[in-house]
Amino acid sequence: MSIRVLLVDDHPVVRAGLRAIIEARGFTVVGEASTGEDALVVASERRPDVVLCDLRLGEGMDGVATTLALRRMPHAPAVLILTTFDHDAQIIRAVEAGAAGYLLKDVDNDTIARAIVDAAAGAMVLTPGGDERLLAALRAPRVVLTDREREVLVLVDDGASNREIAAQLFVSESTVKTHIVHLLDKLGVTSRTAAASEARRIGLL
């Protein structure tokens, strides 16, 4: 029985290329989606065995949120993340959300075919050469932020001052300072710039 695959990417040309590769190898493409929201609808209707999902989708749900939602479905498919950059910190979050693994978009056709088979069988899939980096990141101590700390972190990363953060979140500047102190402590850094950099490295941004 052919493995059933759903393609999720916001670029039609990428989807067309993947479809050609996959169908040439005997797999069945049961559908395509350009957004995470559409992917959930198609997956619910078509019940794919494997979903190839771009990490950086356009507006709406990103690859991480899409992975999490797909893996929570009653007939959860395996999810393979496709990404352009091996150092993208979101890869870690996607795997933690339940992805079977990830592939760089420039891998060869044989690697894609093997990855689909392995993912459908329940195995973990890692892009060639990417295993050490991913495993090291997954073994690192997990930093847990509150919802408010995450909001502050995003604004810090945007370059907002304490006053601007306070205005956007409708809290006092002293409250913002307290959140930033907690962020620096949890991330093990001593400056706002370092906090944003470290957060990106471990997949919090």
Image (cartoon, grey):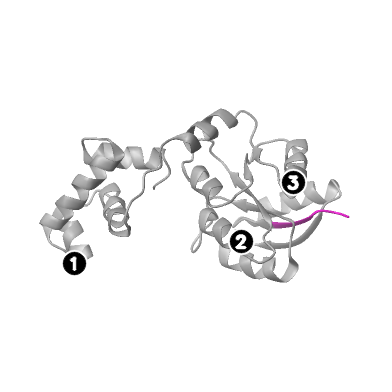
Disc marking residue 170: 1
The residue labelled by disc 3 is 116
Q: Is residue 60 left or right of residue 175?
A: right
Q: Earlier in the sequence, mark 2 or mark 3?
A: 2
Residue 23 appears in the picture as rendered: yes
Which residue occupies the foreground of this view, 138 or 129?
138
Residue 87 at x, y = what percent?
49, 35
Q: Quadrant of residue 148?
A: bottom left
Is the residue marked by circle 2 packed among few (<14), some (14-19), or many (20+) residues within 10 Å? many
The residue labelled by disc 2 is 70
Query: In the image, what residue type sits under mark 3?
Result: Ile
Q: Earlier in the sequence, mark 1 or mark 2?
A: 2
Residue 67 lies in the magenta stretch: no
Find the distance from the CA under tag 3 to the CA under tag 1. Answer: 47 Å
Which residue occupies the foreground of this view, 131 or 86?
131
Residue 155 at x, y = what percent?
27, 53
Q: Quadrant of residue 184?
A: top left
Q: Earlier in the sequence, mark 3 or mark 1?
A: 3
The residue range painted magenta reads 1-6
Query: In the image, what residue type sits under mark 1?
Result: Phe
Which residue occupies the foreground of this view, 171 or 143?
143
Q: Is residue 117 left or right of residue 66?
A: right
**Residue found 78% across the figure and 36% down from its top:** 110
Find the distance from the CA under tag 1 to the CA under tag 2. Answer: 34 Å
Q: Is residue 59 left or right of residue 117?
A: left
Residue 161 appears in the picture as rendered: no
Q: Is 145 located above or below residue 128 in the figure? A: below
**Residue found 44% across the figure and 35% down from its top:** 140
Residue 97 at x, y = what percent?
53, 52
Q: Which element is circle 2 on? A: helix
Q: Name the outermost residue toward the right.
A: 1
